[in-house]
Image: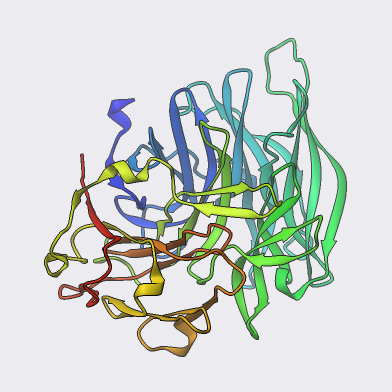
Amino acid sequence: MKKYLKNITYLNFHSLKGWINDPNGLIYFKNNYHIFFQYNPKGLMRDTMNWGHAISKDLIKFKETKIALSPSIKEDKDGCFSGSSFIYKDKLFLLYTGIEYIDKEKGIFKTSQIITYSDDGFTNFNKNKKVLLISYPNNDLEARDPFILLNTNKINNDEFIFVLGSSINKNGSILFYKLTFKNDKNNELNINAQFIKEEVFQSKELGRRIECPSLIHNNNFLITSSMDVNYKNKDEYKVMIKDLNNKYIIPFDLANDLYASLPFLNKKKEYTFFSFIRKERPYKNIYTNLLSLPRIIKLNKDNKLEYSFLDNIDKYFIKRIKNIKNIRLNKYSYLLKINDLTKLNYFKIGKIEFNYDIKKELLTINFNNKSDEKYKISLLNSSFKGIEIILTPLTISIFFIDQTLTPLEKGYDFKKYDKVDINNKNINDLVIKRFIYY
């Protein structure tokens, strides 16, 4: 395996070079977390897509390996698009959408759902036979981004359920399929997919087309990456969460930088999400986009979702910072905790302003004084007091100590002279620690 390692990154995974977007096929297999992702190694823009591949022991330190999937058959000749993974008979299977252009200039293409596997999780995804499961004639009638349902995915030892994102009459929909393995005397990969049902969501909040759908917590919560979401009176690409029991819809993240949020079960069987963070321009003309911090989503006793960082993330932030004037936001990563915001109504991180109105119990986070980058979080009905912030040179991630409040994670390029500006000396519970790279 060592001969395949190319690159090591920490906290927010990015590739050694090129363009990445959707995380794919996230899974724990044979003592490694496997993180696949949409990848164009040849340029800084999206083009014919491959599946890049990285592994991790702790979801903090990532080792990039060789490309896992690339176009090799007619049905995926114009790109291996998003999908998921699962384990069957000690093999790692990848289930993905292949793209074949009918007329590239007019943007007409067909999608197919394809499956392949590896015995060790690293090799032969592309050399083993790719099995075509489903094809759609064109992108007016197409579906994409297969997701194998977790926890309740197995009907029996040889059958699984997966969903696809789609659209009908300009409303987002998801298609359910049953995936069945059959015995084969010649040891060939004999597998087929059978349509079960379609569910249509007539909701402006879920947009006109659903991409990268997933279902979590006994399939009661639908996570969608949706196109043309009507959010705050503006059409956006947005990740949304629909509670299928209580019928409410909430954003996955307060900001609009995250997309294609994909869950998997970590070693503790907790739902853990990666998303890709969209960046407007490449970093130093080397790579474009990166993955978010892993996010844990749990269901509390009141049937509400709770969001948090990884439990083990604190141990990597070792060096306690006593003099915050020495912080270099463009070079190091930091963990900042304020356990009681009621004593601190204003502070800055770089050019980002935090205003807390104690009387209204309203926190305003203002990025660069732009109206479309101002976030107001009402705390009237929460047990909110403090916040946890992880700062890297290229990102900011804000989680609330009341974990039912929606987090905020953004790509943000800190400059050379950006610093943490907290003037109130009475904040005894302020903690700032620096990340130590092993």
Q: Which residue is located at x 85 percent, y 56 percent?
A: 199
Relative to 309, is 93 above or below? above
For the C terminus, give its image quadrant.
top left
Q: Position of residue 62 (x, y in %)?
A: 34, 41
Q: Is residue 272 left or right of residue 346?
A: right
Residue at screen point 32% across, 32% down: 4
Which residue lies at the image location 45% right of the left edge and 34% below the top edge? 33
Tell me if residue 355 comes above or below residue 15 in the rendering.
below
Asked whether 170 or 383 is in front, the reply is 383
Relative to 303, 417 lies left or right: left
Q: As rendered, which of 423 and 242 lies closer to the eye?
A: 423
| Total marks placed | 0
**Quarter containing the N terminus:** top left
Tell me which corner region of the image, top left, top right, bottom left or bottom right, holds residue 261.
bottom right
Q: Is residue 294 above or below residue 395?
A: above
**Residue 70 percent location from the top left of the image:** 49, 43
Residue 326 located left or right of residue 364: left
Corner quadrant of residue 234 = bottom right
Comparing 327 with 206, the one in front is: 327
Rendered location of residue 312, percent (x, y): 38, 40
Residue 292, position as x, y percentages in the image: 43, 56
* Quadrant in which residue 388 is drawn: bottom left
